[in-house]
Amino acid sequence: VLCGHPPFRGQNQQEVLAKVRKGRYSFQSKIWTRISQDAKNLVQKLMEVDPSLRYTAEQGLADTWLRMKAQKPQASPPMRPNLLEGLRNFQSENRLKKAALHVITKQMSDEHTRGLRDIFMGLDTDSDGTLTLGELKSGLQQAGLAEAAPDLEQIVEGLDIDGSGVVDYTEFMAAALDQETYLNEDICWTAFNVFDLDGDGKITRQELRKVLDNGSFERE
């Protein structure tokens, strides 16, 4: 949430998992120059490879930086005019497109995600990295858009790809991206390669089923 993208990236899940096991990441991208050292320290403690040294959930919540952020009053989220329509359209997309957008979101650069990240953080009032129905409703009310979303509960159900009952950062980003952003050829090829498990330039029914049934895409 701090930088707008996951700490580990790869062409497929195997690559990502290999990087997770090594635990190597960096704060080299431009966005991290605007993030405080206290925040970086918290990230390092949460990302520690050795479980005996890694922060527990309780220790993370008790961290000085997190407590200071929680005490600050929340400003109204900077809503984009067409955001609600984008979220509404996403819920009616087919399963494959939802999965592809989910993959694309994880590959996006800071430049492409910064605005949406700010919106997400503004809506996420308890800073837990997920959006509840209540948080979305409150954010829309602050932005004067509450009356435009009588179907908000259905919208949230459509965004909640993994069936957790809340909308996580990647789910929100996948739904909120505009076409101009995700119809980039390089980004689309990256998504294609995630589905093309054997790298033969084609996506078979078996490959499609394997990716769609793996973790986050089990629901219609």
Image: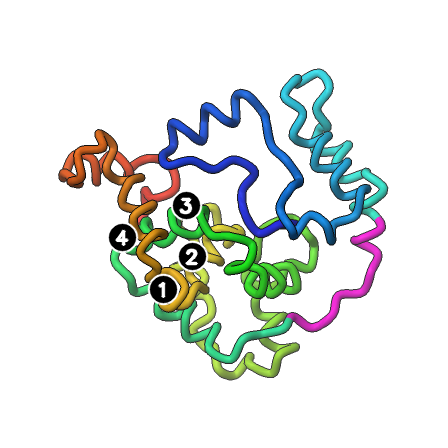
Residue 154 appears in view: no
Q: Earlier in the sequence, mark 1 or mark 4?
A: 1
User: Which residue was labeled with disc 2?
Assistant: 174
Give the Cα separation between the discs numbered 3 and 1: 14 Å
Secondary structure, mark 2, is helix
Query: Label 2 vs label 1: CA separation?
Result: 8 Å
The disc, 2 or 4, on the residue closer to the chain's N-terminal end is 4
- Please give the residue where the numbered disc 1 appears in the rendered image: 90
Q: What amino acid is found at the position of numbered circle 4 in the picture?
A: Arg
Residue contact at pointers 2 and 3, CB within 8 angstroms? no
Marks 2, 1: nearer the viewer = 2
Instruction: Report the residue marked by disc 4.
Output: 95
Residue 132 in picture, x, y percent from top left: 56, 57
Horizontal and vertical percent for residue 44?
71, 32
Q: Give the residue type that dot 3 points to.
A: Asp
Residue at which label 3 appears: 162
**Residue occupying the point 60% across, 83% down:** 144
Q: Which of marks 2 and 4 is in front?
A: 2
Cα gap from disc 1 to disc 4, whole angstroms: 10 Å
